[in-house]
Image: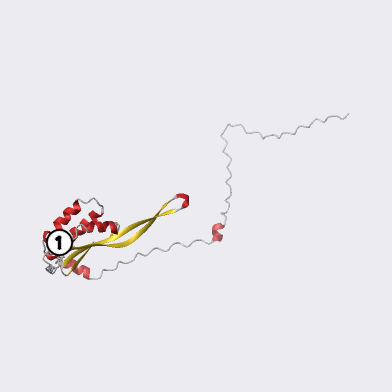
């Protein structure tokens, strides 16, 4: 809601109010020329929905006069109150046989101006000192001992790097692929015979049995 101060009146304006200009104009006509307390009483008992929006604009203008100019709102009079047309929101609804019904949602701008009944000029806005921003409290800094400061200032000594032992070289592929030499097999020695043991007889080879031949006949 915009607030406008000009010459001998204090104004407040509400823009893009979701109300038809014609309906809001009928409400505004009832408070024009009345004092602020009387206008508030008229708006409180009106049954139109636009009366709520006009009441907000009236209260804004009265608060602006009290806060910025140091005036008493109950002594002011509504000298001007008018409504201007705003943009129209276009909507639609489905109708019979595939047709479309047009819906227009109108908006308006409401302006209310207050002035003194004697026609005196409105005093200039009250000058208020700019807010002073206090700086945040400084954090206490802990003092470090001189020895630690000297160590930090001096460059750190570089530690010697560890040297790795050289790895053994891998054997060539030919030697690795070579097969190990075959070792000679061990032969068992004959056991020494004890005294009194009979000598082993040599084994006799068996003759193959002759196959029986069947006589042909």
Q: Position of residue 44 (x, y in %)?
A: 19, 52
| In the image, residue 211 above or below residue 121 | above
Query: What kind of element bears circle 1?
Result: strand
Q: Residue at x 34, y 60 (%)?
A: 88
Q: Residue at x 13, y 60 (%)?
A: 73
Relative to the observer, which residue lies in front, 207 or 30? 30
- 32 with respect to 173 (left or right): left
Q: Residue at x 36, y 57 (%)?
A: 104
Q: Position of residue 23 (x, y in %)?
A: 28, 56
Relative to the observer, which residue lies in front, 157 or 138? 138
- 117 with respect to 199 (left or right): left
Decide if residue 142 is in sight here: no
Residue under pointer 1: 77
- 88 with respect to 113 (left or right): right
| In the image, residue 190 above or below residue 64 | above
| In the image, residue 184 above or below residue 121 | above
| In the image, residue 71 above or below residue 42 | below
Q: Quadrant for the N terminus, please.
A: bottom left
- 63 with respect to 171 (left or right): left
Q: Quadrant for the C terminus, please.
A: top right
Relative to the observer, which residue lies in front, 200 or 36? 36
């Amino acid at each position: 809601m915009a607030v406008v101060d000009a010459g001998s009146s204090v104004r407040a304006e509400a823009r893009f109010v979701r109300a038809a200009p014609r309906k809001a104009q009928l409400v505004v006509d009832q408070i024009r020329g009345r004092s602020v307390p009387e206008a508030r009483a008229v708006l409180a008992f009106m049954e139109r929905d636009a009366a709520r929006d006009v009441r907000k604009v009236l209260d804004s203008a009265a608060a602006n006069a009290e806060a910025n100019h140091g005036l008493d709102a109950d002594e002011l009079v509504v000298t001007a109150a008018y409504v201007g047309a705003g943009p129209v929101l276009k909507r639609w609804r489905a109708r019979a046989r595939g047709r479309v019904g047009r819906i227009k949602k109108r908006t308006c701008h409401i302006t209310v101006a207050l002035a003194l009944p004697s026609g005196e000029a409105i005093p200039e806005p009250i000058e208020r000192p700019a807010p002073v921003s206090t700086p945040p409290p400084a954090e206490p800094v802990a003092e470090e001992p001189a020895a630690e400061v000297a160590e930090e200032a001096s460059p750190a000594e570089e530690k010697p790097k560890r040297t790795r032992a050289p790895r053994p070289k891998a054997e060539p592929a030919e030697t690795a692929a070579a097969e190990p030499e075959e070792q000679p097999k061990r032969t068992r020695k004959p056991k020494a015979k004890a005294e009194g043991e009979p000598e082993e007889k040599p084994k006799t080879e068996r003759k193959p049995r002759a196959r029986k031949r069947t006589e042909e006949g």
